[in-house]
Image (cartoon, rainbow, N blue to C red):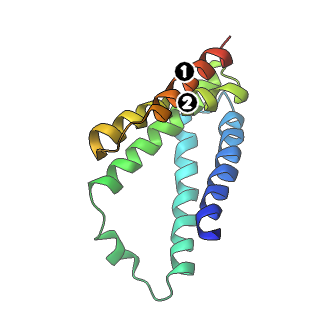
Amino acid sequence: MFHYIWPLAVIVFSNTLYQICAKGIPPQMNTYASMTVTYGVATLFSALAFFVTSKGGNLLKEFSLANWATVVLGIVITGLEVGFIFAYKAGWKVSTLSTVANGLVTIALIFVAMIGYHEAISLTKIAGILLCLAGLWLINK
């Protein structure tokens, strides 16, 4: 059970700190300059984590295994982070931005799962979509 729960705990902890950090970017700082620093640190941390977890691993060999998803993920993550930073600079509140964004992502992913991965949609999932929509409406009142 631990192998199932610990990644979720990392996601919740990291996403909470992520929102705090994204909100804390100085408003006068260029968002892309901030991202350059962020990704420089992320690159160093990821390389260090690779060497710590892959005794004798070959990072260049691992790079050769990358496919389109690895490259597109880098672009998408940049869009995700820039979107959050610009939204906070525009005045979104920490208490609502992530909830609204994740609620909309949840709804979108239900359709992606149905169309792209042939996952069944049940009455329970339809009820969940309706609850998400109701929650989004309530949170924005």
**In x, y percent, where is residue 85?**
59, 32
**In x, y percent, where is residue 132?**
56, 26
Do tag 1 and tag 2 residues touch (Cβ < 8 Å)? yes
Residue beneath disc 2: 103
Q: Quadrant of residue 91?
A: top right
Horizontal arrangement in the rendering, residue 85 relative to residue 21 (left or right): left
Identified at 32% across, 53% down, the residue is: 69
Identified at 67% across, 19% down, the residue is: 139
Q: Is residue 78 above or below residue 67?
A: above
Identified at 59% across, 18% down, the residue is: 134
Q: Is residue 102 above or below residue 141?
A: below
Question: Can I make out residue 40 in this image?
Answer: yes
Q: CA distance from mark 1 to mark 2?
A: 8 Å
Question: Can I make out residue 30 in this image?
Answer: no
Identified at 28% across, 71% down, the residue is: 64
* Mark 1 element type: helix
User: As drawn, which residue projects farthest toward the top?
Assistant: 141
Question: In the rendered image, which quarter contains the N terminus?
Answer: bottom right
Horizontal arrangement in the rendering, residue 58 relative to residue 20 (left or right): left
Q: Earlier in the sequence, mark 1 or mark 2?
A: 2
Q: Quadrant of residue 61?
A: bottom left
Horizontal arrangement in the rendering, residue 51 relative to residue 135 (left or right): left
Which residue is nearer to you in this view: 11 or 79?
11
